[in-house]
């Protein structure tokens, strides 16, 4: 428990005087299916970080909250009243998820030293727009850090992305710095692949320094397939890739998908529902009709194949021919056999494995990473990677709420 003296200086001094800290990481991603919470015992900082995962939970996001998030992640269906409500309601959801994790592990909530909160991305504008003469990049993660801190009585580090954007970066991806601290190897070249709503990759060459780390969003992970499953089958996702396996990939529809401008961008780059949300789905279904692709399973299979092709292409671009490397797959897409089998076929020269082999369950990876990023904030360590985000310099990430 933090010091009973509640001044920020006293609390931070007490936290930094500890040999270890109990840190909670909270993540809810593009798929908007669950709140992932990890409780991590952390010792040290920077390259000396040692993290022990005590436990993790996934709390299902209630349907009414999910509906509001999805509606307000699209410009055409968003409104300021809903966004205002969501910002508070998500703080309550996160607080309950933390309490449930603590109950599950037999830990008192007050024993948590600090929380690292990512929040729920509603909108992400990584490329600069000009307004009133300023070049502005912006992002918004709903879920109030100060409200969460007050509800739990635990300090919260939140709003990790804004500082990187102020320094000219895209504000994403941020997990690769924590990947570097936790998962680098002296002997093995590693690609860490997360297939969530959006797919992203982190390249950790053997014996790397942080300057050697590369990472970016490859494009859709599950976001397009999930949307098609909802529209065409009334299901939230394609369990095990069953529907995709029944279908036949349509080469013309796939070619149209692969012409999306995002796939031609050079890193640094990041993306989300802004590019691959409702507008993209409507266009995809219209093109499918024009091409006379009538079977819904063929459309799903083609979307899943787009995920496979774009991930495999970007991994091949990172790993020079003939170079040995291991690909560790996590995220919801790791359970889709159409996608994983497709990747193993296309990346036949690489070792493709489950992320769990690295010692942390795949579903806990991102929440653990935000616990580590909160610990880095406490120590005043810059936690962005300019070669990954495009920022002009290294910078400390996050804001602090005392609670």
Image (cartoon, rainbow, N blue to C red):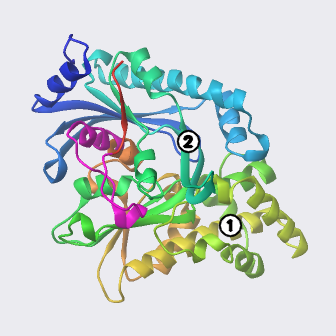
| CA separation in Å, label 2 and label 1 | 28 Å
Q: Residue at x 29, y 81 (%)?
A: 324
From the image, state whether disc 2 or disc 1 is nearer to you.
2
Tell me if residue 328 can be seen.
no
- In depth, the one of 300 and 49 nearer the eye is 49
Question: Magenta span has 395?
Answer: yes
Residue 371 locus on image (x, y percent): 31, 39
Q: Farthest residue to the front: give it.
A: 133
Q: Quadrant of the N terminus?
A: top left
Residue 362 position, x and y percent, is: 39, 50
Q: Residue extending furthest bottom?
A: 322
**Side (left or right) of 8 relative to 172:** left
Near-viewer residue (15 or 257): 15
Up-down: is 84 above or below 206? above
Residue 255's place in the image compared with 31, above or below, is below
Residue ID at (45%, 55%): 172
What kind of element bears circle 1?
A: helix
Dot 2: within a 10 Å radius of its alpha carbon, few (fewer than 14), some, or many (20 or more) residues?
some
Q: Position of residue 225 (x, y in %)?
A: 67, 58
**Residue under circle 2?**
140
Q: For the residue labelled by badge 2, is the local secondary structure a helix, a strand or a loop?
A: strand
Packing grade of label 1 (10 A; few <14, some 14-19, many >=20) is many
Q: Residue at x 43, y 56 (%)?
A: 173
Q: Which corner quadrant of the image does residue 71 belong to? A: top right
- List the residue tagged with mark 1: 303
Quadrant in which the C terminus is drawn: top left
What stretch of residues is rendered in magenta? 370-396
Residue 296 coordinates in the image, percent (x, y):
80, 62
Is residue 321 shown left or right of residue 48? right
């Amino acid at each position: 428990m933090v010091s009973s003296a509640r001044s920020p200086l006293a609390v931070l001094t007490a936290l930094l005087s500890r040999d270890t800290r109990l840190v909670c990481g909270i993540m809810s991603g593009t798929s908007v299916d669950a709140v992932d919470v990890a409780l991590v015992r952390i010792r040290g900082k920077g390259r000396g970080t040692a993290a022990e995962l005590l436990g993790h939970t996934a709390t299902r996001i209630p349907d009414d909250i999910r509906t509001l998030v999805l509606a307000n992640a699209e410009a055409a269906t968003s409104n300021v009243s809903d966004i205002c409500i969501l910002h508070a309601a998500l703080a309550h959801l996160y607080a309950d998820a933390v309490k449930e994790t603590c109950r599950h592990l037999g830990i008192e909530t007050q024993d948590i030293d600090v929380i690292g909160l990512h929040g729920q991305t509603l909108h992400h504008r990584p490329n600069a727009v000009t307004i009133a003469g300023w070049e502005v990049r912006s992002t918004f993660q709903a879920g109030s850090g100060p409200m969460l801190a007050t509800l739990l009585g635990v300090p919260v580090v939140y709003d990790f992305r804004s500082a990187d954007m102020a320094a000219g970066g895209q504000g994403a991806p941020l997990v690769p710095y924590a990947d570097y601290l936790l998962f680098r190897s002296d002997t093995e070249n590693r690609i860490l692949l997360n297939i969530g709503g959006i797919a992203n990759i982190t390249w950790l060459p053997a014996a790397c320094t942080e300057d050697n780390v590369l990472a970016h969003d490859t494009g859709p992970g599950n976001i397009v397939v999930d949307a098609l499953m909802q529209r065409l089958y009334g299901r939230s996702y394609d369990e095990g890739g069953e529907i995709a396996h029944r279908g036949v990939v349509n080469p013309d529809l796939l070619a149209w998908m692969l012409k999306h401008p995002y796939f031609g961008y050079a890193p640094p780059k990041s993306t989300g529902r802004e590019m691959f949300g409702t507008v993209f789905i409507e266009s995809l279904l219209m093109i499918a009709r024009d091409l006379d692709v009538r079977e819904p399973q063929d459309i799903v299979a083609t979307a899943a194949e787009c995920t496979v092709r774009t991930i495999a292409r970007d991994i091949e671009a990172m790993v020079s021919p003939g170079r040995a490397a291991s690909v560790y797959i996590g995220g919801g897409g790791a359970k889709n056999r159409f996608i994983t089998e497709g990747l193993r076929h296309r990346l036949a020269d690489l070792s493709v494995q489950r992320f769990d082999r690295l010692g942390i369950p795949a579903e806990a990876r991102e929440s653990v990473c935000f616990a580590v990023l909160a610990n880095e904030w406490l120590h005043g360590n810059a936690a962005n990677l300019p070669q990954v985000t495009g920022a002009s310099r290294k910078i400390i990430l996050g804001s602090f709420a005392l609670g």
